[in-house]
């Protein structure tokens, strides 16, 4: 009941305009000294999959173009000069960044006035500050000492921080250098093994650079207390059970010391807990040590050994408990021990034996004589 109908194309135009990107810029650096390299950074946003390029132009003090550099655009984002330009005159320079546009995006550029760079003849150095934290602050001999320094308030600081460790005599014992790039925290990588008890100190010194003054931490700010090591001692009497007159000896094993020196003194107590014998041996490192001579037990009962390590500059003393080392001496073999231990007593015993034998022989002979 109805005929077909359509509107003409010309009656429905739709105008699609190019996107209008925006561009913001940031010169790097914003101030410098003559001879420094000037660069620029531009951020493109609001474009529709933008392509094309951004041309960076550096204008000298007379607003004449001194340098241009082009970066290819592939989407919204940050773009920078790669090479930059070395400023050869003091004064205020300016950057401008111009986006070329493409079929779908309009061109846009930053105004020169938005990107001034002040170039001076003389260096105006920033004054950084440095704070430090030793790690650990207290420990024992043999531990590794490290240090951390935090650099702040610098102007894009470069250079290095040198960590110096001073021993208890305030002599430099170790140095380590760490390269830096910007403000922040920096630490020793290797550190130093403390080989002496006492108070050590760190100091961290920043070298400074063209834009930053040098600075260092005072030694007094970084004490590290290194305590003596605490060795342990275990003991083993030899023998633990013996007959009267047998020579008693003792062994002690020293462990946990830091290259210990000094002596171990072995003391033997009789059953009345009276010291009867002492013997000392020199110590040269952790390990087992023993009496060389020992002592012959002269009384039956329970004897005890005690081993005492003297300690040294880097190690605390330590001793075993006498109750840990009982030695039971039996009474059996006393006659033999006494005879063998005293020549005069042995001679008398032999004489008595000889005399007794002679008496027996005489009695037998008399009995056999005829009446």
Image (cartoon, rainbow, N blue to C red):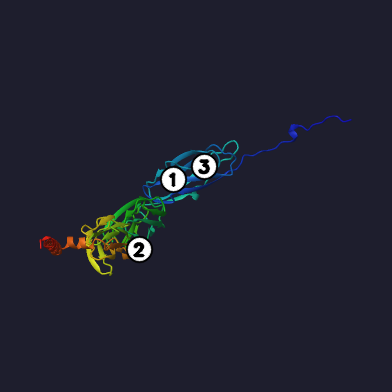
How many marks the image carries: the answer is 3
Between the C-alphas of marks 3 and 1, the distance is 15 Å
Q: Position of residue 244 (x, y in %)?
A: 24, 62
Q: For mark 1, what is the residue?
A: 39
Between the C-alphas of marks 2 and 1, the distance is 40 Å
| 47 sits to left or right of 30 | right
- Quarter the N terminus occupies: top right
Residue positioned 50% across, 45% down in the render:
42
- Of mark 3 and mark 2, the one earlier in the sequence is 3
Q: Which of the 4 quarters of the picture holds residue 74?
A: top right
Between the C-alphas of marks 3 and 2, the distance is 53 Å
Q: For mark 3, what is the residue?
A: 98
Q: Which of the 4 quarters of the picture holds residue 358?
A: bottom left
What secondary structure is found at the residue carrying circle 1? strand
What secondary structure is found at the residue carrying circle 2? helix
Of residues 171 and 304, the one drawn nearer to the viewer in this rendering: 304
Q: Position of residue 290 (x, y in %)?
A: 25, 57
- Tell me if residue 178 can be seen: yes
Q: Residues within 10 Å of mark 3 (few under 14, many from 20)?
A: some
Q: For mark 2, what is the residue?
A: 221
Of residues 11 and 170, the one drawn nearer to the viewer in this rendering: 170
- Of mark 3 and mark 1, the one earlier in the sequence is 1
Of residues 179 and 39, the one drawn nearer to the viewer in this rendering: 179
Q: Nearer the viewer, mark 3 or mark 2?
A: 2
Q: Position of residue 167 (x, y in %)?
A: 28, 59
Query: Vertical placement of 263 versus 3: above or below?
Result: below
């Amino acid at each position: 009941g109805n005929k077909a109908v359509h509107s003409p194309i010309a009656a429905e135009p739709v105008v699609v305009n190019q996107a209008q990107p925006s561009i913001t810029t940031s010169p790097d650096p914003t101030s410098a000294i003559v001879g420094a390299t000037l660069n620029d950074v531009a951020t493109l946003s609001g474009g529709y999959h933008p392509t094309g390029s951004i041309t960076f132009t550096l204008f000298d003090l007379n607003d004449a173009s001194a340098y241009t550099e082009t970066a290819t655009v592939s989407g919204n984002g940050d773009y920078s000069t790669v090479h930059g330009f070395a400023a050869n005159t003091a004064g205020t320079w300016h950057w401008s960044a111009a986006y070329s546009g493409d079929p779908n995006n309009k061109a846009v550029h930053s105004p020169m006035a938005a990107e001034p760079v002040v170039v001076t003849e003389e260096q105006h150095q920033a004054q950084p500050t440095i704070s430090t934290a030793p790690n650990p602050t207290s420990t024992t001999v043999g531990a590794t000492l490290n240090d951390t320094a935090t650099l702040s308030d610098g102007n894009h600081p470069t250079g290095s921080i040198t960590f110096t460790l001073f021993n208890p005599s305030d002599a430099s014992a170790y140095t380590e250098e760490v390269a830096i790039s910007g403000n922040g925290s920096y630490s020793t990588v290797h550190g130093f093994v403390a080989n002496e008890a006492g108070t050590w100190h760190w100091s961290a010194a920043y070298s400074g650079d063209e834009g930053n003054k040098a600075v260092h931490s005072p030694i007094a700010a970084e004490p590290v207390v290194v305590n003596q090591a605490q060795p342990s001692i275990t003991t083993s009497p030899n023998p633990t059970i013996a007959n009267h007159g047998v020579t008693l000896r003792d062994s002690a094993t020293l462990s946990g010391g830091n290259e210990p020196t000094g002596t171990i003194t072995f003391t033997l107590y009789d059953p009345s807990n009276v010291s009867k014998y002492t013997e000392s041996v020199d110590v040269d490192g952790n390990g087992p040590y023993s009496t060389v001579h020992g002592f012959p037990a002269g009384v039956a009962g329970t004897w005890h050994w005690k081993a005492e390590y003297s300690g040294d500059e880097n190690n605390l003393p330590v001793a075993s408990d006498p109750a840990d080392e009982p030695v039971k001496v039996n009474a059996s073999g006393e006659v033999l021990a006494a005879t063998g231990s005293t020549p005069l007593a042995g001679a008398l015993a032999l004489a008595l034996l000889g005399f007794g034998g002679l008496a027996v022989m005489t009695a037998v002979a008399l009995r056999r004589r005829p009446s």
